[in-house]
Image (cartoon, coloured by chain):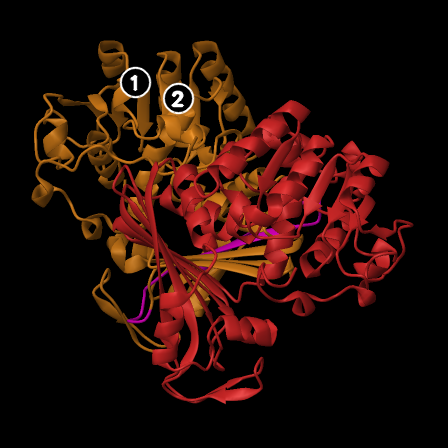
Chain colours: A red, B orange
Amino acid sequence: MIGQASSESTAPILAQTQTRVVMYGLGSMGSLVARMLDEHGAELVGAVARSPQKIGRDIGDVACLGKQLGVTVAKDIELVLADTRPDLVVMTIASYMEDMFEPAMACLVAGANVITLSEELMFSRRTSPDETELLDKAAREAGVTITGTGHQDGYWVNLVSVLMGTAHRIQRVVGKASWNVDDFGAELARDQQVGSSMAEFEQWLAGASRPPTFGRNALEQLAVVAGLNPRDASGETKPVIADADTECKALNTVIRKGSVLGFTDIDTLSTDEGVVLTIEMTGMVYGPDNADYNDWTIFGEPELNLRNEKVPTSWTTCATLVNRIPDVLSAPPGYVTLEALPQLRYRHPRRVSTDTTSVPSAEAFRGRTNGLR
Amino acid sequence: MIGQASSESTAPILAQTQTRVVMYGLGSMGSLVARMLDEHGAELVGAVARSPQKIGRDIGDVACLGKQLGVTVAKDIELVLADTRPDLVVMTIASYMEDMFEPAMACLVAGANVITLSEELMFSRRTSPDETELLDKAAREAGVTITGTGHQDGYWVNLVSVLMGTAHRIQRVVGKASWNVDDFGAELARDQQVGSSMAEFEQWLAGASRPPTFGRNALEQLAVVAGLNPRDASGETKPVIADADTECKALNTVIRKGSVLGFTDIDTLSTDEGVVLTIEMTGMVYGPDNADYNDWTIFGEPELNLRNEKVPTSWTTCATLVNRIPDVLSAPPGYVTLEALPQLRYRHPRRVSTDTTSVPSAEAFRGRTNGLR
């Protein structure tokens, strides 16, 4: 009498189907996903890493599961696929189609479903249409799915689309999110132009050959989930200037007032319906009062807002991927984007790690989805 | 190439199917729904109201549409159903099954789909199982659906469930929402015990025969949408005490420090999985710094939160109902609750009211879903 969704809800997410999973990538994200999958009762049958420090060790040790699983981390995905014939490969190796295409194709051709944190693959139909079509074709031929998910699935797409579903008429949707350069070390701090003067920043921006932002892929996915037709995408980048001297731990220096603390990528998408979607993503050195947040405003009738404070992005990234697994395993074959999946929902894990003291804490994983893999 | 959801997205929500709608109830909520439906191009073919001031007038005048529709507001739903044979009846007449059962049954038996703001009907499977089963049976026999939706659909159920879908392990979910007694006049202020002493409040509470809260229905619906099995529901009520003298416009008086400003209903639901859901709904006289909000915290791994500020509840209530119409018209016959519907989403209206100056503003409709119909 409770409703159809509940009949399957008490069963653990993966154990019942004996899903055999290969981890392709065992950085911070891959390791946290491995721990979550283990607590859901999934069968981790293989793992591939790039780092020589990880290859040859047990996946349980590399992913800090507090136990060994008798599965050795390998170097070559094709050998692992041939050996293990997994149902699903969890790919946490790259953000862009450019780096994802060949490895993903190898998994699909081997008959494995793919779920990935690749930000572009969440919705690559417009940024990489040819590669997307080839992946779609390969997945259909193999009878499997390939899907991109992660933090944006919940916070930039589906929470926003549900909020939009409570509005009568929308003119504009504006999202703002932020991450702390100090969480990611010196290399990323330099990438974010931390410490530059305004003149240096302008010069860099004029000549910079930067990869596309993930904002565009997320906005295009949001539009489609919200029933709108994406039209033109555009982007701009603005520096964040220090209004007081600010300590930068990543560079072990103080950024002087008037210098660059980082920058904001602003992506905008128009739609055939006239609704304009924008996301402003800021990466900067935080002062004492800053923390990661996710903030959306809908301008229209009526005006609406949604805010998530202190978002633990690594955790939401990995938990979302794990909670999406039953959806992608039961979706029709092909490249599957979020509008074709059921509403994202919680899957209650069946056990707590046997030795939680040895499992990395949320704090240890705190950070952004890219850069830390 | 954009994805399957978009193929139907540019068409106006209701015009394409020529949905013929009867408004059953034309209070604040019904009138606002009528305006929204008109802007979506729906065909308003009939209306029923209780008030003698509304009966006999054109629905366009009663609902402040800024134009007449040539449809007269009537008194008797059965006659209107027989005359108009609508596809859909929008019921905004009552909150509880007790008051909804017979009128809803009349609509179903006449072969009309029903969508309603009745808070209990959002998920009445456990609070009124027998009546729910009878409505379900009548709907199936007539090949139509009956569904309860409104503000809670988005803010207490689906936003929360999506947020839960980004968590790995949940122990507890706590929601808090608030409304201003001063928005609803003297009668409701007295119902909320405004101005009572603590002793008077305790005495009232001990003897009060209050209807069930809507928190329970929403929590049970949330549990099922989130894939959890509802177990035990419980409730308690706590006074809110003034910590300073506070002006009460509804009673045209000042509530002295130490007296009752209103109260909080706390509903709690346990689940088979061990996850505990709570909602705290406060109705009180606001001070200068208070405004309606919707605030949820998820305790678990990790801890997550979501907050909506200054929620225009009447608007979100009505827009959600309108945006749900395509979902309920294409759902399989019967009593349909939210876990069986697609994700709530925006439907772009096809026109702006011809005379927006005469249309009530959001401010005029500002308030809570119950009490104001």
Comparing A325 with B317, the one in front is: A325
Q: Which residue is mark 2?
A: B329
Please state the extent of the stretch shown in magenta in the rendering. Answer: B264-289
The reply to whether residue A298 is in sight is yes
Which of disc 1 and disc 2 is earlier in sequence?
1
Give me the chain letter of mark 1.
B
Tell me if residue A243 comes above or below residue A17 in the rendering: below
Q: Which label is found at residue B213?
A: none
- Can you give x and y, in whole percent of width and height, for residue B52 in the image? 14, 30
Query: What's the amino acid at mark 2?
Result: Leu
Say whether residue A196 is magenta.
no
Q: What residue is shown at x 52% (from left), y 47% (from top)?
A: A120
Q: Which residue is mark 1?
A: B17
User: Do marks 2 and 1 both belong to one polypeptide chain?
Assistant: yes
Give me the chain letter of mark 2.
B
The reply to whether residue B230 is in sight is no
Tell me if residue B124 comes above or below residue B258 in the rendering: above
Indicate left or right for A97 with A87 as reference: left
Q: How many marks?
A: 2
Contact between marks 2 and 1 (CB within 8 A): the answer is: yes
Q: Secondary structure at mark 1?
A: helix
Query: What's the amino acid at mark 1?
Result: Thr
Badge 1: residue crowd in 10 Å (few <14, some 14–19, many ≥20)? few
